[in-house]
Image (cartoon, helix red, strand yellow):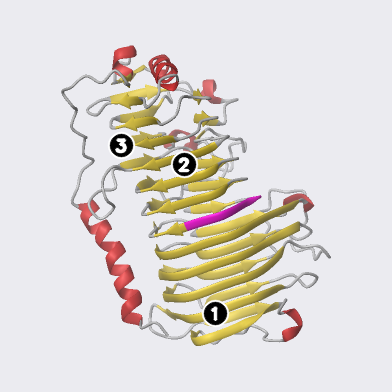
């Protein structure tokens, strides 16, 4: 068994980054004095950066020039606040294109009717060998949409609202800060109305050193959302939201998540999968060396009854839970109530959940049930492994575990006592 002190050291090392961040205000990168013909500053294309004027056209013009130049940089300079409406920044572009954001980018919320048929704020599409970096802030001013959300106020009709979406439809892009994590985490995305960063139909994506902020009661504000993508790494990020810190949705594979600080929010979720009886899959996900603090869920897998497909090969390693309401949960009866499907109905079909390991998981549960494996009768969960899991209640007492049609094994110390069925019949 890995000593608790080793796991605590992981927590301290990650938390030190937070301590450093608390001492810093958003910094601005130094502007170089030399002229670079491959740098396209949005100010040079007419952007005013006064926090009032609509600078959308200047952004589009700068993008067009940078997109067609090898090794180019589109620069959003520091010291200014740029208001933009819906932006579609599209390729194909020349190789090694950078979008460098050192200033503040604000969503224009002065005309709410303008957004009524728009579901994205910033979209980046069909680019290869592309990176987003810098010291800046992307602020969607989501409070305007949350105020009229049916999830906050039932008197309003439920409708879609725009999201800051990086929609990459080809290969290879990176979203990074420009300093090491333990020093600075300067790129910041805050208050967009729904998903903060959405990665869709993309491959070979790296997100590193990004801070994402939204209030705990902001509706449907997933921090980073993956959808129909593969080969994605998410590292050294700080995420606080009103929904999943990271959500991994259908037809996504080969994801590595490490050194994440999550909270508030709904933890790190796989799914939901199989809604409306559709075939969907997620496979090969690793989550390691991360902290979840005061979240509603910790490590969650959620699938709908009647769905098809599979969720398999997940590894959770060295994760610290701090006052998490439901630290470890597999729910094959997930139902959010916004579907024609009858919640609670037992179906013969279910998304197959298998080969899931939880190793070196420690911390505190905010509820009496710290482990919950609620699996389907017709398609149980199998090959679940609990190894060196130590979860107590905040008062020091021991929580319980709940298992339904869950098959697997225990290794080392497991607290609370595991309820996994070790029958070999389902060790497939």
Spot occupied by residue 41 in the image (x, y as percentages of width and height): 30, 20
Spot occupied by residue 427 in the image (x, y as percentages of width and height): 71, 79
In the image, which disc is placed on residue 199? Answer: none
Query: Label 2 neighbourhood size at 10 Å, few (<14), some (14-19), many (20+)?
Result: many
Mark found first going from the N terminus, 3 or 1: 3
Mark 3 secondary-structure assignment = loop
232 lies left or right of 354: left
Quadrant of the image occupied by residue 259: bottom left
Residue lying farthest to the left in this orientation: 33
Mark 1 secondary-structure assignment = strand
In the image, which disc is placed on residue 134? Answer: 3
- The span picked out in magenta is 250-256
Nearest to the observer: residue 161 or residue 171 = 171
Pair 2/3: label in front: 3
Res. 222 visible in picture: no
Mark found first going from the N terminus, 1 or 2: 2
Q: Which residue is mark 2?
A: 196
Mark 2 secondary-structure assignment = loop
- The residue depicted at 63 percent of the width and 73 percent of the height is 373
């Amino acid at each position: 068994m890995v000593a608790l002190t080793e796991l605590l050291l992981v927590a301290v090392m990650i938390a030190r980054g937070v301590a450093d961040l608390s001492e810093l205000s958003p910094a601005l990168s130094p502007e170089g004095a030399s002229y670079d013909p491959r740098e396209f500053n949005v100010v040079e294309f007419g952007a005013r950066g006064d926090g009032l004027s609509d600078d959308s056209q200047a952004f589009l013009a700068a993008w067009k020039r940078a997109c067609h130049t090898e090794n180019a940089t589109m620069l959003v300079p520091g010291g200014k606040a740029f208001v933009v409406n819906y932006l579609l920044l599209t390729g194909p572009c020349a190789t090694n294109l950078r979008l460098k954001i050192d200033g503040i980018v604000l969503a224009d919320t002065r005309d709410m009717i303008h957004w009524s048929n728009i579901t994205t704020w910033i979209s980046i599409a069909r680019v290869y060998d592309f990176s987003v970096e810098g010291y800046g802030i992307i602020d969607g001013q989501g409070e305007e949409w949350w105020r009229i959300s049916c999830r906050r106020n039932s008197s309003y009709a439920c409708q879609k609202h725009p999201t800051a979406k990086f929609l990459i439809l080809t290969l290879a892009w990176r979203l990074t800060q420009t300093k090491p994590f333990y020093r600075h985490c300067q790129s910041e995305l805050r208050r967009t109305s729904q998903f903060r960063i959405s990665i869709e139909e993309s491959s070979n994506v790296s997100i590193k050193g990004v801070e994402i902020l939204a209030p705990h009661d902001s509706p449907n504000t997933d921090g980073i959302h993956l959808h129909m993508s593969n080969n994605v790494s998410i590292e050294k990020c700080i995420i606080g939201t009103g929904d999943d810190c990271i959500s991994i949705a259908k037809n996504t594979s080969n994801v590595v998540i490490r050194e994440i600080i999550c909270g508030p929010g709904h933890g790190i979720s796989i799914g939901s999968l199989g809604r409306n009886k559709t075939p969907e899959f997620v496979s090969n996900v690793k989550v390691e060396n991360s902290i979840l603090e005061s979240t509603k869920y910790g490590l969650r897998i959620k699938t709908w009854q009647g769905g098809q497909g599979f969720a398999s090969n997940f590894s959770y390693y060295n994760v610290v839970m701090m006052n998490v309401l439901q630290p470890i949960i597999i729910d094959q009866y997930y139902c959010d109530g916004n579907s024609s499907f009858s919640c609670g109905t037992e179906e013969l079909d279910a998304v197959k959940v298998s080969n899931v390991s939880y190793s070196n998981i420690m911390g505190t549960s905010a509820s009496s049930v710290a482990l919950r494996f609620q699996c389907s009768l017709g398609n149980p969960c199998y090959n679940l492994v609990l190894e060196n899991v130590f979860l107590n209640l905040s008062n020091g007492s021991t929580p319980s575990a709940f298992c339904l049609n869950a098959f697997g094994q225990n290794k080392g110390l497991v607290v609370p006592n595991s309820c996994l069925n070790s029958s070999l019949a389902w060790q497939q």
